[in-house]
Image (cartoon, helix red, strand yellow):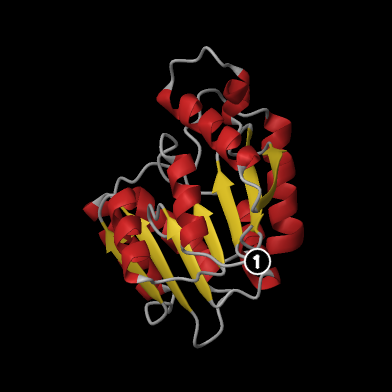
């Protein structure tokens, strides 16, 4: 998700539309999901269609059977990821806002994926602590797209709920270049810089980050794979 501060460069948006038309085509389920989100008053901060397809392909490349998502919103990225699961796969997605969660549940049901997706409502850190305590892992892929202040803690929880080879993806790690500002008082930038510092200091994580531009403006993803224990 990206809270857009300025209007995207028209060329970025045009290229996104070209990618969508050339490689993705029309997707009535995802279009209906966005329409339902808008009708329910949810913010327009879903991943873009191209980014959603990227998440779907990452899940397929990881051969994910168990997926964890932190930050559901209206379920757009949830549907993209859950479509990559095998018939006996499962996905848990965490959402703090009960209204968002209710919209997401309806969208997931309309997409025919309710049998393999569980939406849990509450504060992500508390839900994750309970999952770790219950030994609910391992998950094969974790997508983090929640509040940016707690990104480092979410990655630590993803490691605790993962295994060697688990893929971790964190959205919105460039923040229109704001991540470069060590003097920023924006809690989201402070949290994102802490995320980079923590990931860079973890020997078990092989990681990189990639900048993105497009209809969702200038941002990026952090990608990591969990290695074996030291």
Q: Depth check: 99 or 125 in front? A: 125
Estimate how packed mark 1 is, as few (under 14), some (14 to 19) or many (20 or more) residues with alpha carbons within 10 Å.
some
x%, y% of residue 106?
A: 31, 68
x%, y% of residue 91?
A: 44, 71
Q: Residue at x 56, y 38 (%)?
A: 198
Q: Is residue 229 left or right of residue 87?
A: right
Q: Depth check: 99 or 12 in front? A: 99
171 over 100 or under it: above or below: above
Asked if residue 141 can be seen in this view, the reply is yes
188 over 111 or under it: above or below: above
Work out which residue is located at the far top of the displayed protein and give it: 183
164 over 37 or under it: above or below: below
Q: Is residue 201 left or right of residue 43?
A: right
Q: Residue at x 38, y 52 (%)?
A: 73
Quadrant of the frame with the C terminus? bottom right
x%, y% of residue 80?
A: 54, 65
54 over 195 or under it: above or below: below
Q: Is residue 120 left or right of residue 65?
A: left
Q: Residue at x 62, y 39 (%)?
A: 201
Work out which residue is located at the far front of the displayed protein and give it: 230
x%, y% of residue 103?
A: 30, 59
Q: Quadrant location of residue 50?
A: bottom right
Q: Quadrant location of residue 180?
A: top right
Label 1 secondary element? loop
Q: Which residue is mark 1?
A: 165
Total numbered labels: 1
Asked if residue 173 can be seen in this view, the reply is no
Work out which residue is located at the far bottom of the displayed protein and give it: 88
Q: Residue at x 62, y 29 (%)?
A: 8
């Amino acid at each position: 998700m990206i809270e857009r501060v300025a209007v995207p460069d028209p060329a970025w948006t045009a290229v996104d539309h070209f990618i969508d038309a050339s490689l993705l085509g029309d997707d009535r389920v995802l279009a209906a999901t966005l329409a339902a989100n808008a009708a329910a008053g949810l913010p327009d901060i879903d991943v873009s269609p191209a980014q959603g397809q990227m998440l779907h392909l990452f899940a397929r490349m990881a051969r994910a059977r168990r997926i964890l998502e932190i930050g559901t919103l209206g379920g757009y990225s949830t549907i993209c990821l859950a479509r990559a699961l095998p018939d006996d796969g499962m996905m848990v997605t965490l959402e703090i806002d009960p209204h968002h969660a209710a919209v997401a549940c309806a969208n997931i049901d309309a997409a025919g994926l309710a049998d393999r997706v569980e939406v849990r409502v509450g504060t992500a850190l508390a839900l994750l602590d309970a999952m770790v305590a219950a030994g609910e892992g391992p998950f094969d892929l974790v997508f983090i797209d929640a509040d940016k202040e707690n990104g480092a803690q979410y990655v630590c929880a993803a490691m605790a709920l993962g295994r060697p080879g688990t893929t971790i993806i964190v959205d919105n790690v460039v923040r229109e270049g704001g991540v470069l500002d060590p003097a920023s008082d924006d809690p989201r930038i402070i949290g994102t810089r802490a995320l980079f510092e923590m990931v860079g200091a973890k020997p078990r994580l092989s990681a990189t980050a990639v900048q993105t531009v497009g209809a969702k403006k200038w941002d990026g993803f952090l990608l990591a794979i969990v290695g074996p224990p030291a």
